[in-house]
Image: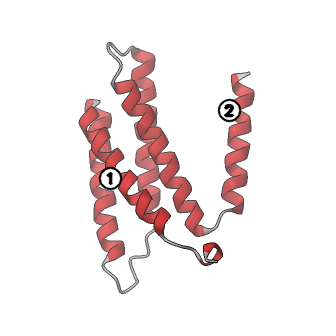
């Protein structure tokens, strides 16, 4: 049953991505990154984590790193603005903190990365898209 639910969720995600605007794709990346970080945060707060929980933390943090790398790769550094360059530096910092969190199972680094991504997502969500203007 779990496998069927997982398969359904994967198909649903593919459908969302296929029909999403570039703006929505970035939102989906933020949402996925935050979801993986929240899972890692919850697992790191458990007392006496077992091998399976540690492996789940590692997978969640690895996926978060991959998402931050994807966000960095999506930046257009050729435009005449400091914003993409500043975002690149911030994503690089988050990536380093997540790698540290992954190696050391450091809850503080996870919390910091989670907070930074939440702030970035709220800013991104506030950007009105032409199809959202009324």
Looking at the picture, the colour scheme in use is: secondary structure
In this orientation, which residue lies closer to the viewer: 99 or 13? Answer: 13
120 relative to 134 in the view: left or right: left
Give the residue displayed 67% in from the left and 48% down from the top: 13
- Residue at (34% x, 26% y) in the render: 44
Tag 1: Cα neighbours inside 10 Å, few (<14), some, or many (≥20)?
A: some
Q: Residues within 10 Å of mark 2 (few under 14, many from 20)?
A: few
Under circle 1, the secondary element is helix
Circle 1 or circle 2, nearest the eye: 1
Earlier in the chain: of badge 1 and badge 2, it is: 2
| Number of on-image labels | 2
Proximity of marks 1 and 2: CB atoms separated by less than 8 Å: no
Residue found at x 41% / y 39%: 37
Quadrant in which residue 1 is drawn: top right
Residue 62 position, x and y percent, is 42, 40
**Residue 4, quarter of picture:** top right
Residue 6 circle label: 2
Residue shown at 49% from the left, 41% from the top:
35
Residue 99 position, x and y percent, is 31, 42
């Amino acid at each position: 049953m779990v496998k069927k639910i997982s398969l359904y969720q994967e198909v649903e995600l593919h459908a969302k991505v296929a029909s999403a605007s570039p703006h929505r794709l970035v939102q989906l990346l933020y949402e996925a990154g935050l979801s993986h970080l929240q899972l890692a945060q919850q697992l790191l707060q458990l007392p006496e984590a077992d091998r399976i929980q540690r492996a789940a933390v590692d997978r969640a943090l690895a996926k978060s790193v991959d998402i931050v790398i994807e966000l960095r790769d999506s930046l257009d550094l050729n435009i005449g603005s400091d914003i993409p360059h500043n975002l690149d530096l911030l994503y690089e910092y988050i990536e380093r903190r997540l790698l540290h969190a992954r190696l050391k199972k450091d809850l503080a680094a996870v919390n910091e990365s989670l907070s930074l991504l939440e702030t970035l997502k709220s800013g991104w969500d506030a950007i009105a898209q032409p199809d959202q203007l009324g």
